[in-house]
Amino acid sequence: MSSKDIQKALLMCGDQAIAEIRDGEVFPVPGKENLLPMYFQAHTFVEPWLASRAIDRHRINSRLLKKALRLEERDDVSTVLYVNAATITDNYWIKDPESNQTYKEIRFSENYFDKLALYGDVNSFSFERPSRTPELTSIGSFEKCWRLEDGAWWMYKSGRAEELFSELFVYKLGCALGFPMAEYKMDGEYIKTKDFTEGKWNFEPAASFLGDNEDYSDNYHAFQQFGQRIADEYLSLIVLDTLCVNMDRHTYNYGVLRDQETGEILRLAPNFDNNIALIARGFLSPGRRQEGLLTLFKDFVQKEGLKPILPICSETMIDKILMEMDFPVDKGFVKDFILSRYEEMRVLCREPERIPLEAQLTQAKAEKETAVATISMGSTQKTEATIMNKTKAWDYALGIIRADGLEPSKEFLELVEKEKRGEITEQDILKHLDQKYRTKADTKKKNTRSR
């Protein structure tokens, strides 16, 4: 297909025709409105949507790829139509109304141009190979490629050591904190991430309904329209971005997952694309740690009256993550930075009087469960994990305060017993404590105003 073909075409969702395209304008098929890309809730012309799906023309390997494919027209719209505007991360595509093509026939099942797209491999520069490739609809400015491995698509990305480290560290930290994260792992000198749509859901970037508006409050309210749970998931995304200084969060690298059959919005897409975070662009000096993203976060939570519940981020957690990562970076700086940043965010998220004895107990227990000990062995040192089970960790934490003549509430001790039995989690306890002390703080403020 070429740009001329969108004068008369069909917009497809899998094998369902969901809109007619006439003279570049989209006309929904009656009864299929819920399946349309969300971009068309506010727009009617198809070309901008198509262009947003195109490979970044400024990438060096993008130009090599187009040359290898002998693309006569190399504008963004013509580029995506070369592969029916199909992508890995959703099942939308453009069909000639006179064609009998099915989605199975046009969806990607192989990629002969991965090496050319990733690092400009001259041996991949061949005019003889099949020409359908997902690289033409792989957006983003970094050199990357898609590879099909054991039935799943993985995106490989290149970068400097600091960028690869930051991407992998943020992934591991996000997992440790309990946030939904797209899977990342190293593969030789590249980092790769698994397609989180798994061919079952459609990824809708926030740009579809927010354009390039990155304002936290506007985004938060937009996600509230899909349900408070999704707005809370967005808040978790912003928490991790702030903690790890992700300066490159834009409306194409976060969004929602939708059901391919009904169009229902299911949840926020997992957190991905953190290679410009943390130390990727250098080390943030101590004097600047409270600027930038931290200020934006502070203004946002204060404006909206939010008190995010921060998961426990401990020194032992950071040590464990860093111990798993073999990169030539200053790990000591990374640990100190994350821990100090976390403390700054804790101050923003809860008043000092709302960090009670019971919350400190919960953190002490968590740290003991994942404690990392450094053991001297002759002239060398060996680092190994010394992990307590839940019961012993709680006994340790309770023993510390009881030695000082302190005792938590009966209600809290009941929660401890439930967590020991696996009926609830640490995060359930923290949420309970947050609500408990938030209610007390609000009552205190109310009483103060009434005097």
Image (spheres, rainbow, N blue to C red):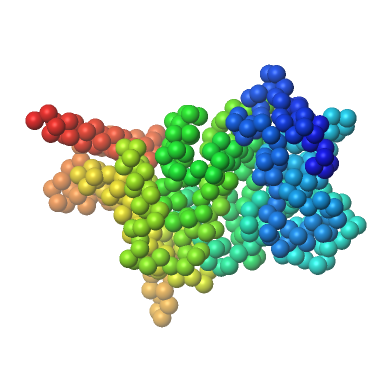
Q: Which residue ends up furthest to the front in the rendered image?
A: 23
Q: Is residue 26 above or below residue 48?
A: above
Query: Residue 27, percent across and down?
Result: 71, 25
Taking the view exactly as shown, the residue that stands out farthest to the bottom is 379
Q: Quadrant of the C terminus?
A: top left
**Where is residue 20 drawn, in percent x and y?**
76, 27
Residue at image coords 82%, 43%: 2
Query: In the image, what residue occupies the spot 40% across and 53% down?
Result: 293
Rendered position, 400 above or below 256? below
- Of residues 120 and 379, the one nearer the viewer is 120
Q: Residue furthest right?
A: 128
Q: Residue visible at 45% across and 51% down? A: 241
Q: Position of residue 22 (x, y in %)?
A: 77, 29
Hey, which quadrant is residue 386 in on the image?
bottom left
Q: Nearer the viewer, residue 14 or 50?
A: 50
How many callouts does the rendering have? 0
Work out whether residue 250 or residue 233 is closer to the camera in this orientation and state it.
250
Pinpoint residue 368: horizontal percent, then vertical percent. Answer: 34, 54
